Image (cartoon, rainbow, N blue to C red):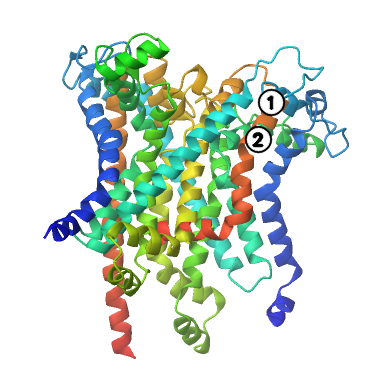
Amino acid sequence: MRRSVANRLTPYMFLAPAAVIMAIALLYPLGYMIWGSFRDWNPSQTIGEAEFVGLKNYVTLWNDPNFHESLGVTLKFAFFVVSFEMVIGVGLALLLDRDIRGMSVLRTLFILPMMIAPVVVGLMWRYMYHPTVGTFNRFLEDIGLPSVDWLGQHALMSIIIADIWQWTPFIFILSLAALQSLPSSALEAARIDGATGWQQIVHIKLPLMMPVLIVTALLRLIDAFKVLEVILVMTQGGPGLSTEILALRISRTATEFRELGVAAAMSNYLLMLLLLLTVAMFAFNRLQEIRAARTRAAAEEGV
Amino acid sequence: MAQSNTRQNPAFYAVISVLVIMAIGPVLLMFVNSFKLDVDIISGSSGLVFLPTIQNYEKALCDVLWYQPDHVDFCSLKFGGAFINSLIIALISTILTLVIGCMAAYALVRFRFMGRDTVSMSTLMVRMVPPAVLLVPVFGLWNNEFCLDKDGLIGGAIREMVGGRGDVCLAGTHSGIILIYVAMNLPFVIWILQSFIVQVPRSLEEAARVDGAGPFQVFFKVVLPLIKPGLAAAAIFTFRIAWNEYLLASALSDRDTKTVPILIVNNMSEFNVEWGVIMATGMLLAIPPIIFTLFASRQIITGMTAGAVKG
């Protein structure tokens, strides 16, 4: 009798620590933030002392040109980063999907950039972009070209390049794994029917990889909104606001301007944006799956 | 195999070498520069002709060296202490996350009282939350709410022992940073481990149960040894995040609990960057992840694909 009660309680006992920690340190803070976003709150006050101001923080942000600029930079950054990385990563996977001796060594070297701390990545690139001692400008000087003001005029492009360097391997590894798990029968059939390499890629490999590619792009997109340290170290959001992505702006609003309420409201905007993206991608993924299932069924019927 | 090797043309290998150089070039550059004097870095005698020196490392580690290097007058960079803080925080949070995440994943797989879809959904949702979003509430909570009141029993006792401003708060302690790291990493770890636990044959567990093992014994003696690869992957990912994270640590730490990333960022924001020393600290911070990558790349790739493809 007692044993059966214990058995019934077991799963809850196994789950309890995780549930408690996530409730205390993840869900409660998120609720706290939403609550705080309706208040005029600075770091020296507790949330109870802060004055309730309703939607004021949200309205202020909505009309704040700096916030718009920051949002624009964030969206631009995320868009360019994800599209370049997808194209390059998938391209490389298609190119390198063959028996190469030492492929595992190659993969090991490729994942190195994403294991290294973002702070260190920012540090390395800040050095390479340095106007006078940096690697790139020195190289340009050596071959007789004018030097480029990497972190000045072209700051956004420079941080995008750094992010592409760090995260393309992620896409590459995942799409390579997807490629290598494709059913060989479909590819063989295409080869027998005389499909060229290009046709195989466009009509067979890419459509079959699509579900994985979408999830990969989604994960990368979500992570692109989290990038902060690399940019903080490289440009500190400058010059002006040209590289101040939202995550950076939130942290500056909270720590430099000491307006926790506004920072919380901004966090909420960012969360809503991410939620929207996630849901949209989920819906798209489902749709794609349904369509894929239908084509497969149609193809089988045709055979 | 041999046939396919002969078929590749030289251009293909050229492409691969360019890719490899692009991937590890910046890291190598940092490695080389960390052994150069600032004069050499700035003067631009680019190339490999320089006298390697460990002065930068001596300067960075001056607070833990057993001897006093001649060129260091004043030990401004307390790298050694920060390194130890980083190590404590990363190791403890990794262990806690693994133990707790393992148990939760096991419960979710074996007892089926909640849909796996719910978990995968919520994992993705939590993964979506950027650390910057957690900054505001964590800063507020850790400083104000998660405190032991000075009038309370435990808080009073701690204050008697350590002193301080009255309340004893989570902010500024190792445990405060560890708590948020554990919470941040848990969903991902649970998700990865689930996909490994599913593969453990049920019959093994039942055999152990027949032999009279309780649920906890089954878990620790049968299931855990079988999912070691999954544990390794999860451990590396958790460690990496805890080791590399800057933002939340900078909000929660005080002078004595600074981690290495904070130290590096603080030194980078000065106008005149001492490139040699900063590269040495960066290299020291990068060494543990590099070692993991070189020795456990298979586990990392498994973890990455398990986390994404099935997510």
The x, y position of residue B136, in whole percent, is 33, 25
- Look at the image and tell me whether residue A230 can be seen: no
> Which image quadrant is residue A56 in?
top left
The x, y position of residue A36, in whole percent, is 23, 23
Q: Residues within 10 Å of mark 1 (few under 14, many from 20)?
A: many
Task: Identify the residue position indicated by label 2 in the image.
Answer: B284
Name the chain letter of the residue that bears numbered label 2. Answer: B
Dot 1 falls on a residue whose secondary structure is loop
The span from disc 2 to disc 1 (Cα, nearest Å) is 10 Å
> Which image quadrant is residue A7 in?
bottom left
Dot 2 falls on a residue whose secondary structure is helix
Query: Which numbered dot is residue B61?
Result: 1
> Which image quadrant is residue A270 in?
top left
Name the chain letter of the residue that bears numbered label 1. Answer: B
Q: Nearer the viewer, mark 2 or mark 1?
A: 1
Query: Which numbered dot is residue B215?
Result: none
